[in-house]
Each structure stands twice: as structure tokens, then as C-alpha cells.
Image (cartoon, grey):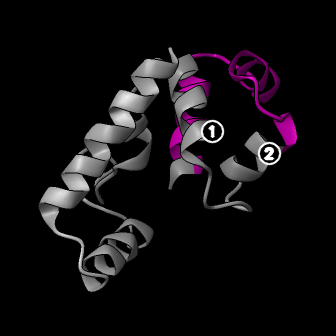
Amino acid sequence: MIGEKIKQLRKEQGLSISELAGRAGVAKSYLSSIERSIQKNPSIQFIEKISSVLGVSANDLIWENKSGQTGEELDDEWLAIVREAIKSGMTKEQLKEYIDFYKWRTQKKD
């Protein structure tokens, strides 16, 4: 799903794979494998680099519902991650704290 969304946005903006990879500072071969769904689990760092160049949020690449609009549905991998967090005893508050920490850490690096 993420690969298809990246490819769609890239083409809408008239970028080649080489141009997007170069601007984002990622390997062209890796980007190609993501777009073709050979690689299905890109890192958050990869998603952030690509989304920045495409001018969308990382959430716009990650979240997609069945009608192709961004927003409401989680794919199976995200659901599995959330289920694992719940299974391990993580509360909603703890997850929110982790997200806030991650945002703070990311902002501090800039």
C-alpha cells in the first residue's frame, strides 16, 4: 500500500524514481523495491524522507482506507503492531507518551 501511494504521488508530481530518490537521499533501488511491493516494511526514517520531498505527511503515506483516501483505516501490519502493544500490557496513555517522546526527540534533532 505504501509503495503504491508513493508511486502515485511521485507520478502526480512528475518525478522519476531517480529524482525522488536523489532528493530524499535514499537508494533508487530500495525506492523501486518499495514501489513494486518487493519490500513492504520501509522504516519510519525512509517514510519521513520520502514524505518530506513529496510534500505530504508521513501519515498520508501510512494511513489509507479501502477507497484510496487517506485517513481512517489501518493496514494489517499496523493492526498487528497495535494488538501486540495491547497484548504486552501497554496502555493507551503509555503509547501516547511514547509518541510524544518520539515527536520531541525528532524535533530536538532538527
Going 68% across and 22% down the picture, which residue do you hit? 24
Question: Image height check: is 75 above or below 20?
Answer: below
**Of residues 79 and 11, which is closer to you in this image?**
79
- Report whether residue 70 is seen: no
* Left or right placement of residue 28 versus residue 6 in this view: right
- Name the secondary structure under disc 2: helix
Going 59% across and 38% down the picture, which residue do you hit? 45
Instruction: Count neighbours of disc 1 (C-alpha within 10 A) and say few if under 14, some if 14 to 19, many if 20 or more.
Output: some
For the residues labelled 1 and 2, the Cα–Cα distance comes to 10 Å
- Name the secondary structure under disc 1: helix
The span picked out in magenta is 3-29
Going 41% across and 21% down the picture, which residue do you hit? 107
Q: Which residue is mark 1?
A: 46
Residue 64 badge = none
x, y (%) of residue 8?
54, 36
Question: Image height check: is 56 above or below 97?
Answer: above
**Of residues 108 and 84, which is closer to you in this image?**
108
* Left or right placement of residue 91 versus residue 9 in this view: left
**Of residues 89 and 37, which is closer to you in this image?**
89
The image quarter in which residue 99 lies: top left
Going 60% across and 27% down the picture, which residue do you hit? 49
Is 61 within the magenta? Answer: no
Sequence-wise, the earlier of marks 1 and 2 is 2
Q: Amino acid at mark 1?
A: Phe
- Give the main secondary structure of the magenta stretch: helix
Q: Amino acid at mark 2?
A: Tyr
Label 1 close to label 2 by CB (< 8 Å)? yes
Q: Which residue is mark 2?
A: 30
x, y (%) of residue 35?
67, 47
x, y (%) of residue 71?
23, 45
* Left or right placement of residue 87 versus residue 110 in this view: left
- Report whether residue 46 is seen: yes
